[in-house]
Amino acid sequence: MRSTAKFGVDVAERWSDDEYADPARYLGHRAELVQSLGPPLVPGDRVLDLACGDGRLAVYLLPLGLSYLGVDASEAMVAAARLRLGPGAEITLAHLDDFRPPAPVATTTIFRAIYYASDRAAFFGRVAEFTEKKLVFDLNPRRYRLDEVRAELGAAGFRRLDLHPFFVPQKVALPGPLHRTLLAAENVGLLGRALLRLRFSYMCAASR
């Protein structure tokens, strides 16, 4: 997880703007897929966002009528998220290996951070205990074997795994036509798989 030593408050407050060339496109599309991939979320569903960073994803989840609980191990990130979101969301300081919500949540999300889990299979099992609809995360297919991840999810009780390519670049803001072309390519099987051999990642929704 992100450490308090690495991030000061000033860095945390501008984290998403520094990390994403186009935060609205990147995080907005991610929020759309959190809602729609796998079992759909409905207004009132609660999202637990592990390793939430500065909480910027909530900016795009809350207008969908979803409730948001963000968790991060960095005090600076937690402070930045609370400042950004105010009373409209709950933000908690905790490590993703240790945190359990006080009540079940509809969805648990974890982005750009699943490798922080000390034991991925055990992490999936623990998340399954308090997640009612689905676990949504990103996965680099060039770094992780999909069959191994699928088997670990199945052992945790997540029998269904929905995959969707995510082709919004993190570090480059694309012109509108190219951006729309890549979004369309997410839904073209052969083209999507070809692009994933070179770069980009899957959005994964694991459910029962």
Image (cartoon, rainbow, N blue to C red):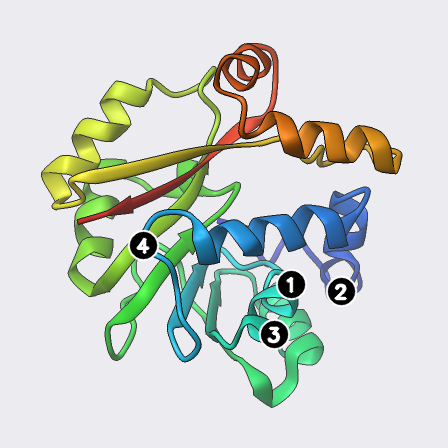
Q: Position of residue 121 (x, y in %)?
A: 21, 37
- Residues under labels 1 and 4: Cα distance? 27 Å
Identify residue for label 1.
54
- Residues under labels 3 and 2: Cα distance? 21 Å
Callout 2 amino acid: Glu
Left or right: where 15 falls relative to 125: right
Q: Earlier in the sequence, mark 3 or mark 2?
A: 2
> Which quadrant of the figure has residue 162?
top left
Depth order, front residue of 21/202: 202
Callout 3 amino acid: Pro
Depth order, front residue of 204/152: 204
Check disc 1 and report its element: helix, strand or loop.
Answer: loop
Q: Earlier in the sequence, mark 1 or mark 3?
A: 1
- Residues under labels 4 and 2: Cα distance? 33 Å
- Label 1: few (<14), some (14–19) or many (≥20) C-alpha neighbours in 10 Å: many
- The answer to whether the residue labelled 3 contacts the one labelled 2, judged by CB atoms less than 8 Å apart, is no
Kindly tell me whether residue 174 is visible in this rendering: no
Identify residue for label 2.
13
- Label 3: few (<14), some (14–19) or many (≥20) C-alpha neighbours in 10 Å: few
- Residues under labels 2 and 1: Cα distance? 7 Å
> Which quadrant of the figure has residue 86?
bottom right
Callout 1 amino acid: Asp
- The answer to whether the residue labelled 2 contacts the one labelled 1, judged by CB atoms less than 8 Å apart, is yes
- Label 2: few (<14), some (14–19) or many (≥20) C-alpha neighbours in 10 Å: many
